[in-house]
Amino acid sequence: MNAREGVPRSLAVVFLAVICAVNTMAQDAHRPSGESTIQLPQSSTENKANEWAEIVARTGPAVVVVQTDEGLGSGFIIRADGIIVTNHHVVANAKAMAVKLQSGEVYRNVYLLSSDPVNDLAFLKIEAVDLPTIPLGNSNSIQLGDAVLLVGSPLGLEQTVSSGLISGIRLDNGVRVLQTSAAASHGSSGGPLLNRSGDAVGVMRFKLVNGENLNFAIPINYVRGKLDTITVSNPKSFVPLTDQAERHSGVWVAGYGSGAFERIYMEVLDILGSSGVKIANYGLQRVTNTRQDGYMPLPSLIEMLPTKGADSLLYIKVEPGAPYLSGIESATVYFQCFDATGHVLWNEKATSVLASGGNVLFHPRGWKSKLIPHIGKPGLLLRQGQEDSSPEPKK
């Protein structure tokens, strides 16, 4: 190459570099101000939260509420033609039944295809097609420490989720069970225990042992093993659960209040349910009413008592309290208990207590110390056959 050829080539290289620089500047000019060209990776915690959120959105439509004349439980659809798995104890004594989907649809013609008291499994059929389903995983591959997610309707609070780990793999009367730290309460029974892929690896079986909330699930391989033997030729038909049958005795728990209300409300339900108090309502009694922060006012609740069929009403009001212990959230909690005619049975007030319910059981003014002495007395009567000292029904 001679000197004459070298100069144009050098100029060409410089010209190309200028063009590239101009293009880059033009792209930056069109990019919104403040937008970074560098994408920072999400933390592992954020990724896990996003994964669970996606799984809940995908599987939620297949999780159902099983309503019976004896109470309620959870279940999930495993075949698109309306086959649902739940617990045997959810349906064992039921005469009337309905199944409610996440969409709000209620199927009142429900059939029992199979029920196994040993494995605590039951298979139901509703008259439907093309339903959403939850895929069944392989419970033999589960290991201690695996992350799991429970979806169910504890105390009627539909589509409640709780995460945890597989904390034990045990045998219970010759049946393999999965112990989990995922929180569960009455009504969670029959809900799916999901793995990180969104597959069901267990069927939740809520159980109280000596008053402790120890949560176990039935391995999903027991469900898979029974699918081939299920027949729809001669199913048992339940009586359709009518509006009249949906009236429930027991205490109806409702109220309104500050941001801490829902937290306190949930813990009250858990304390009452685990102590053997029969609860009449299926969930938060929330309505559109701006005067009461979105919750139904007391006069309306008392008017509804006869139609609800409840024996009593426990009304909770929560007001924000002064900062407690270096800014920790506190609250003032009011309890009012009414009989079925609307007459006051008792009143209690707890001032400046921890809104989280943390250690207030031993706090002299804690709301638990105000509530617990009334359990087993008028307004908060225990189920038949139960005593204060034992939350388990007598045999």
Image: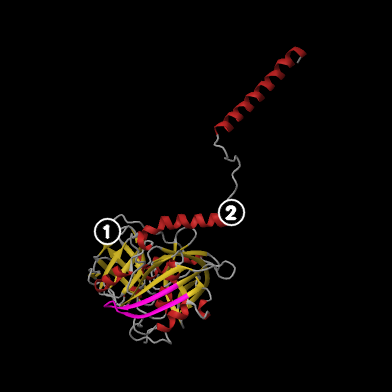
Residue 313 versus residue 323: which sits nearer the camera?
323
Report if residue 173 is visible in the image: no
The percent position of residue 220, horizontal first and vertical second, equals 43, 67
For the record, the magenta segment spans 333-350
Q: Is residue 169 magenta?
A: no
Residue 339 horizontal side relative to residue 192, left or right: left
Disc 1 vs disc 2: which is toward the camera?
A: 2
Q: Secondary structure at mark 2?
A: loop
Q: Quadrant of the N terminus?
A: top right
Residue 181 horizontal side relative to residue 15, left or right: left
Q: Residue at x 39, y 87 (%)?
A: 387
The percent position of residue 158, horizontal first and vertical second, equals 37, 64
Q: Residue at x 36, y 66 (%)?
A: 284
- Mark 1 to mark 2 CA distance (whole Å): 42 Å
The residue labelled by disc 2 is 43
Colour scheme in use: secondary structure
Residue 137 horizontal side relative to residue 93, left or right: right
Residue 282 versus residue 303: which sits nearer the camera?
303
- Vertically, is 58 above or below 330? above
- Which of the 4 image quarters holds residue 67? bottom left
Within 10 angstroms of label 1, few (less than 14), some, or many (20 or more) residues?
few
- Which of the 4 image quarters holds residue 236? bottom left
Q: Is residue 346 magenta?
A: yes
Within 10 angstroms of label 2, few (less than 14), some, or many (20 or more) residues?
few
Q: Quadrant of the C terminus?
A: bottom left
Amino acid type at image mark 2: Ser
Return the disc, 1 or 2, that comes first in the chain's sequence: 2
Please name the predominant secondary structure of the magenta segment in the image. strand
Amino acid type at image mark 1: Ala
The residue labelled by disc 1 is 128
Residue 224 versus residue 37: which sits nearer the camera?
37
